[in-house]
Image: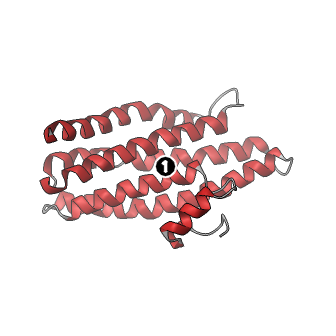
Amino acid sequence: MSSLDKLREQNLAAYLDALAAKTSTPGGGAVAAVVAAEACSLVAMVANFSKDETAKDIAGRAHASIANLLELGDQDALAFESVMKAFKGEGDRSSACEQAAGIPAQVIGICLTHVEDLEYLSAQGNPNLITDTAIASLLFDSALKSSELNILINMKDFDAIPEVLESAINSVPGATNRLQFIASTIRTGLS
């Protein structure tokens, strides 16, 4: 299986085999995108089991995000291959690193669009699926923190981080606090 196989077209076992292989792609950036896509899938499921119009809108947004995140996972693998080539002298290193950092910034942006949706579902969603809402919160939290790390590693040799990337990094703590609050509130309610 090549690293250029599309995430959407792989079965789970093939994806995990590719991830475990002694190759640099897919790697952590693709994992962050897939984890965020899994969170979106849970958001869509909970919303689909909820009865109001807001929940239907949430489900639609989540479905759209799944496709975008899987595409970003594929783009991450290609961008990392460009970074590796640039480190070998085949291309502009600065440009390759900035492009590679831009992908996790986009993953962060998508995750941020669903924080409010999770807050809504934790209060108004189907109560029988409340743990799925909490798990989605935890998965988004992981995807956000992972994406932040991927930006930082790609920008570590630069004197200044471009504003759009700095903005993405700065948005992570507030979002993760909100996500952790959702999960911990649900956890407390189960005790």
Q: Secondary structure at mark 1?
A: helix
Q: Which residue is mark 1?
A: 107
**Picture colour scheme:** secondary structure
Residue depicted at x 13% and y 63%? 51
Residue depicted at x 72% and y 31%? 157
How many marks are shown on the rendered structure?
A: 1
Looking at the image, which is closer to me, 137 or 62?
A: 137
Residue depicted at x 52% and y 43%? 147
Q: Quadrant of residue 98?
A: top right
Give x and y (percent) for residue 73.
55, 57
Give x and y (percent) for residue 70.
50, 61
Give x and y (percent) for residue 52.
13, 61
In the image: residue 93, left or right of residue 187: right
Looking at the image, which is closer to me, 69 or 35?
A: 35
Q: Quadrant of residue 184?
A: top left
In the image: residue 160, left or right of residue 47: right
